[in-house]
Image (cartoon, helix red, strand yellow):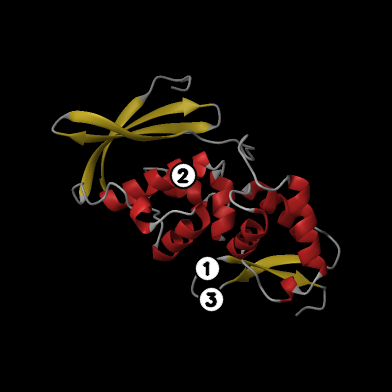
Amino acid sequence: MMEKEMPPKTVELKKAAVHIFKVKNVLNRRVSLGISAHDLSFLLGKANTYVRDVENPFTTLKYNIDDTALLCQVLQLSPSEIYQGVDSSPIALSLNIMVYEYKFGEAYEVYQVVKGAEEKLYEIIPESKDPDFPVESKASLEEIHDWVDELFSSTYFDMPRTAWEMYDIVVEKFGFPVKAKYLRDAVKKYTSKRSYPKLSSNEKSKGFFRTLYRKDIGDGL
């Protein structure tokens, strides 16, 4: 148990089992792979806080069907693994959420209540702005940066690309797992450039509202 800085409080909630178990299974998998909420948001092509907000039990944001397909692909989970626990549970879960203060914000322990007894499902520990988990990666930071440099020098980014497309290629090249943070940092090198050519990330894929990356040479196209 992490050290608690303030006395906790407990809040009772009702939540759909499919949402709670999906969050639980994705959370456990991403943490085991050393993927931060920020990095998983990047791979999904969403805002930096997207995964953090989905995992927050007090928001109504949920992973949609398209998210689920991508999560299975990125995290190498089968549909049965991502929905594990749903079939054996009621449609709606009675939850007790213990809330306490942590150094990076509010933390949550999520308990399912069955016949008056509590069973802990998972715990959400807020992460620092840019955590770097000490886990295995088949490619180093330098190798990923060199690889993205090669892609940028080629015609790869002449067409809009998604983060998960890049991640798929890097996993195919180096093996699984690869630290998503390394890829995000390598892409950021080109999206944060002040001069041209650089990567533009203002486009969204049609129907999915996800970030696309395309080479911008400053010609307004």
Q: Give the label on residue 209, or none.
A: 1
Q: Nearer the viewer, mark 2 or mark 3?
A: 2
Where residue 214 sits, quadrant-wise, is bottom right
Amino acid type shown at disc 3: Lys
SS at circle 1: loop
User: At which x and y percent is residue 185?
Assistant: 71, 50
Q: In the image, what residue occupies the spot 69% across and 76% down?
A: 159
Q: Is residue 113 left or right of residue 64?
A: left
The N terminus appears in which quarter of the rendering?
top left
Q: Is residue 195 left or right of residue 172?
A: right
Q: In the image, what residue occupies the spot 74% across and 60% down?
A: 191
Closer to the chain start, of discs 1 and 2, is 2
Closer to the chain start, of discs 2 and 3, is 2
User: At which x and y percent is residue 70?
Assistant: 48, 61
Residues at discs 1 and 2 in contact (Cβ within 8 Å):
no
Q: Is residue 47 visible?
A: no
Q: Is residue 127 above or below residue 175?
A: above
Amino acid type shown at disc 1: Phe
- Residue underneath mark 3: 206
Q: Is residue 113 visible?
A: yes
The C terminus appears in which quarter of the rendering?
bottom right
Q: Nearer the viewer, mark 1 or mark 2?
A: 2
SS at circle 3: loop
Where residue 36 sits, quadrant-wise, is top right
Number of numbered discs visible in the structure rendering: 3
Q: Is residue 102 above or below residue 163?
A: above
Q: CA distance from mark 1 to mark 3?
A: 7 Å
- Residue underneath mark 2: 29
